[in-house]
Amino acid sequence: MRFARHGWPGCERPIVSGADGVWRDLSPVARDVTAEVLTWTEEDLSLATLPEVRHIDRLGPPLERVGKIVCIGLNYRDHARESGLATPDEPIVFLKAVDTVVGANDRVLIPPTSRKTDWEVELAVVMGWTARYLASPEDALACVAGYTISHDVSERAFQLERGGQWDKGKNCETFNPLGPWIVTANEISDPQNLGLRLWVNGELRQDGSTADMIFGVAYLVWYLSQFMVLHPGDVINTGTPAGVALGMPDQPYLKAGDVVELEIDHLGRQRQQLHSAS
């Protein structure tokens, strides 16, 4: 199934789509799209009885209440190479604030002092069950409710040139478009076999595969559970393939008016226009 939320900010309504591809109003059986709802089956929802939704407004963030956003840096071999950095021995972990999350097609704001706003298409993992000190990676995927697309927008000067933590370059407002919807985990037979692509102003910049991950989804869920409790509704941004502005010779960072489009196989597509923050 696919779960989404449509409507204007603060007024989104939950919708769901099954095998027939028809969007249906979820509100007769659920107040909103929550981590618990993502674990329900079509039978739990009585999906065929839900009213059809014939007009889809703006798609908001597909989960009503994101818990924490745990991000993995340098998790693709080709991205590590283009960055001139060694392949990490363990996952590089940082956090993004929940208030960075916007809808898949909402505008992205460039901070007033930004010089190096960059793009990153990423597979996002949505937790449906608690992961706490998991015994092995083999136990991990059973805790995943679904997958979606994350645009991990980054300000490289803030991230790499201002000292301290990466978080400064990752947590500007609107820096995590999420969606357009969450696809339940049972629909994705192999999260390590998904193509990821990103375009800037119609020019293909990133064209990779989750097969190139250094640390796969199951490993990441297991690994993170050794250091923090992953709760239902938490999101893991699993890293980005090569093709970011940071790794290009001319470093064509984003500017106001640019349009970024990104997609992942089976998970849909995003589109954002860049605007200057006032």
Image: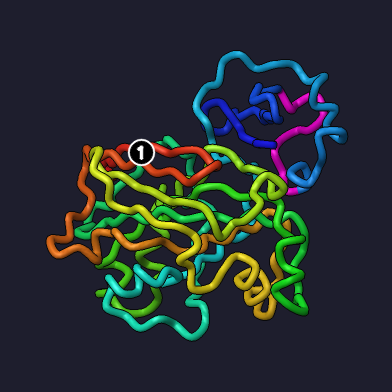
Question: Could you say where residue 216 lies in the image, as x and y percent from the top left?
Answer: 57, 68
- Residue occupied by mark 1: 272
In the image, what residue occupies the spot 25% across and 38% down? 202
Question: Could you say where residue 86 lies in the image, as x and y percent from the top left?
Answer: 35, 83
In the image, what residue occupies the spot 68% across and 24% down? 20
Amino acid type assigned to the residue bearing label 1 in the image: Gln
Q: Can I make out residue 133 in this image?
A: no
Q: Is residue 31 magenta?
A: yes
Assess disc 1: are there few (<14), some (14-19) or many (≥20) residues with their C-alpha within 10 Å of its C-alpha: many
Q: Is residue 86 above or below residue 155?
A: below
Please tell me in which quadrant of the rendered image residue 135 appears. Answer: bottom right
- Seen as rendered, the residue at the extreme bottom is 89
Judging depth in this view, the residue of 146 and 189 nearest the camera is: 189
Q: Is residue 87 above or below residue 169?
A: below
Q: Can I make out residue 83 in this image?
A: yes
Q: Is residue 117 left or right of residue 226?
A: left
Question: Could you say where residue 3 lies in the image, as x and y percent from the top left?
Answer: 66, 36
Q: Is residue 71 left or right of residue 165?
A: right
Q: Is residue 49 left or right of residue 93?
A: right
How would you classify the magenta stretch by its main secondary structure? loop
- Seen as rendered, the residue at the extreme top is 54
Q: Is residue 188 above or below residue 83?
A: above
- Magenta-tinted stretch: 25-35
Question: Could you say where residue 165 lies in the image, as x and y percent from the top left?
Answer: 40, 76
Marks counted in the figure total: 1
Q: Is residue 195 above or below residue 31?
A: below
Judging depth in this view, the residue of 218 and 15 nearest the camera is: 218
Q: Is residue 95 left or right of residue 207?
A: right
Please tell me in which quadrant of the rendered image residue 250 appears. Answer: bottom left
